[in-house]
Amino acid sequence: MKPETKGAKTPMDAKPILSVNNLAVSFDTYQGEVQAVRGVSWHLGKGETIAIVGESGCGKTVSIQTVLRTNPKGVGRVKSGEILFDGENLLEKTAKEMRAYQGNRMSIIFQDPFTYLNPTMTVGDQIIENYRQHRKATRKEAEHRVLEIMQLINMPSPEKNMRRYPHQLSGGMRQRIMIAIAIICDPEILFADEPTTALDVTIQAQVIDLMNELKAKLNTAIVLITHDMGVVANMADRIYIMYAGKIVEHGSSDDIFKRSAHPYTKGLLGSVPRVDRKTDEDLYSIRGAPPDLIAPPPGCAFAARCRYAMNICVRTEPESLHLGDSGHFSACWLNHPAFTRDARGERGMEVHHG
Ligand code: SF4
């Protein structure tokens, strides 16, 4: 059975609530400048779910930390770009002005609740404290709001569980608490950074269902950061595939799952186990490692790992090309009209790898 995708609005049919345009972020290290994000653009519509997908180190988390301004202090230098939220450039906001956005209009669910939750406080107190940091509310008003949220996230025995400490709850319940903290101030955008990675498969499915349910109830836009195409298939309207600090393919869920055009995307999809595959041999893994971003290669950054790489790939970087009229883009020479399979043969475009 192929992964069922959500289908979706494509291209994005609403004015974006968040637009990241040509964002470049570098880290200065003793070895040199690490170009973690290299001119990335993506857009999020109101009430929409997008996924930014790639291996670790591809720049997806750095992009989100830059939007939320949660990069560790002094780390990460924005070299170019703009981040427009409701028409205002967040990169021009002071740290104080950003507090009106962080945890209020935008919030985040992290991968591992244990590293975020305070082990010495009950989870109820932690949600209350978070709420009162952002809203002027009495303790009683905050408690009332917390109970409302506990019901919204389908927390069993909410009053009893509010009085428990994180270690007294299961992994799934702790992740529900993280979701409660993230949504208690009614954010317009919810970022979810690998929200199910630390959970077992059954609990993963429950958390995905909960996030989809909340999105339907609250109309919150979601930016999902993950390497897991299974999670993406169940949540995303549109998908951005990121590799070596750049977006290499983007389109609707259907474009990516049914008509993927970039070899890296195909590799990500091929590495997901599926019940319709007959043997383990069908499971494809992308060999090698991403390039060193201190000295990114001049051509396609994926060339050293790509089974279809040609001479031009190592010399010249492919542009992102619009495929059809659906808002599906891919940055690969294979998709260029001048590089059909026949043309490659006629022009002697050698393939590097078999
Ligand atoms: Fe592979 Fe070349 Fe396409 Fe890069 S541009 S993904 S190396 S075929």
Image: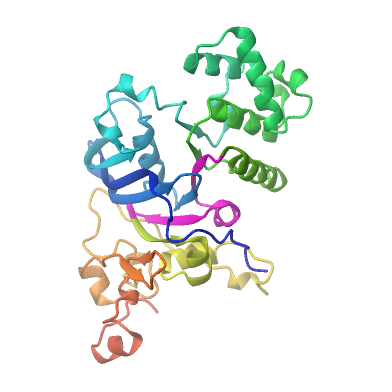
Q: Is residue 148 magenta?
A: no
Q: Position of residue 122 (x, y in %)?
A: 66, 15
Q: Is residue 239 magenta?
A: yes
Q: Nearer the viewer, residue 292 or 184?
A: 184
Q: Position of residue 29 (x, y in %)?
A: 24, 36
Answer above or below: position of 13 versus 33: below
Residue name at image x 25 percent, y 76 percent: 311
Q: Position of residue 200 (x, y in %)?
A: 68, 44
Q: Would you say residue 122 is visible in this rendering?
A: no
Apparent side of residue 133 relative to residue 311 in the rendered image (left or right): right
Q: Nearer the viewer, residue 288 or 94?
A: 94
Magenta segment boundaries in residue numbering: 219-246
Answer above or below: position of 271 versus 345: above
Residue name at image x 63 percent, y 69 percent: 280
Quadrant that contains the N terminus: bottom right
Q: Which image quadrant shows ligand 1?
A: bottom left
Apparent side of residue 42 relative to residue 266 in the rendered image (left or right): left
